[in-house]
Amino acid sequence: MKKIYIFCFFIILVGIFLNAYLYYDKSITKIEPKKNNNIISNTNCLLRPIAFMINNISEALPQSGIYGADYVYEMLVEGGITRLMTIYTKNIPERIGPIRSARHNFLDISMEYDAVYAHFGGSPKAFSDIKALGIPNLNGIALDGKMYWRDESRKAPHNAYTNIEKTLEYMKKFGYDRVVLVNHFNFAQNEVILNGKSAQKVHIPYSFSYFVDYEYNENSKDYKRFMKGKPQIDEAKKLQMSAKNIIIEFAKNTSMDDENRQEIYLVGSGKGYFITNGKYIDITWQKSKRNEKTVYYNEKGEEITLNVGQTWIQIIPIEAKVEIK
């Protein structure tokens, strides 16, 4: 571990002299993770993670750039619909969006990564928390026509987009361009095959009108994603969205205002499932503070190990009737 910190410190010094290069390259420079005892730690020396709020209602489909995210979080917002937050730690696609407004629950996740939070507007509680917590953020209300542009082929407010060059440019302008060490999950060097039950199909109901499905593909060894019964497509990639790992986290939620905005209790502990390679196991989760990472444990009390690939974290109401077959 000491060697890793020394190595990271060296990379940070090098990064200072190569700063100009980083900001005009097409992807974020990264350091390959260390391998130890068949586990890959994602403790990387890289540019600061970036979290984007992505619109997820029917009018916003298809979205762009989700395929490039390391992690995708999905939670309820108002009206029984969900919103996505994509976390990028290694690279960012050329087109990301539609970008949508902030909700305070997602700040708890953004802080876990010490990420820069990119959004377009927000709820009163989100704005209050952003200010109180000092969240580094890039708000489209102030940056419309600068960091963000409008796709005129779509109707507002479902037409705001950004890209890698603009994001890095405004991170630098706002002084958010420091290096952050990411050590959120452990990843296996070889494929993890869970000693669990079959998980060929996964049904996740968020509300009466909104549900998500995943179907396991034996050839690609990932889960194809469906939204309200239809394949969810990434417009930029022209492919159906998929997940290598799926984490289902049950969390208490309540309506907090007349707009039916949600209070989701992410600090504390609860139950869930971990799904990968056609199998699933029961897990528990624990988060001690808003800015501390959520840790997921197997039945032996060990932190779970993910397979390398995109991970979707589905944070759902406690009463949701998840079906895994």
Image: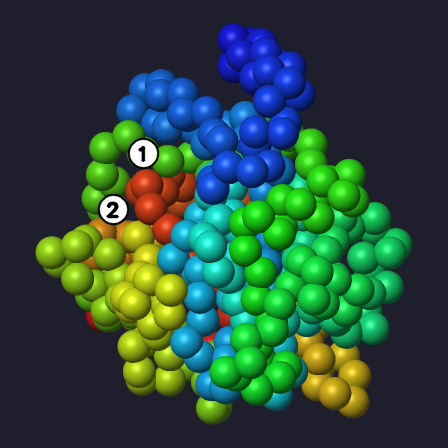
Label 2, label 1: how far apart the Cα atoms are:
12 Å
Quadrant location of residue 257? bottom right
For the rendered model, the colour scheme is rainbow
Q: In this rendering, would 213 be left or right of 62?
A: left
* Dot 1: element: strand
Q: Is residue 222 visible?
A: yes
Q: In this rendering, would 313 be left or right of 220?
A: right
Q: Residue at x 77, y 74 (%)?
A: 123
Residue 319 point in image, percent of width and height: 51, 77
Label 1 neighbour load within 10 Å: few <14, some 14-19, many 20+: some
In front of the other: 169 or 4: 169
What amino acid type should be assigned to the residue bearing mark 2?
Leu
Say if 245 sits above or below 205 in the image. above
Q: Residue at x 70, y 48 (%)?
A: 170
Q: Which residue is mark 1?
A: 188
Q: Residue at x 60, y 73 (%)?
A: 150
Name the front one of labels 2 and 1. 1
* Dot 2: element: loop
Q: Which residue is mark 2?
A: 194
In front of the other: 321 or 69: 69
Residue 256 point in image, percent of width and height: 76, 79
Q: Is residue 103 visible?
A: no
Residue 171 point in image, percent of width and height: 70, 44
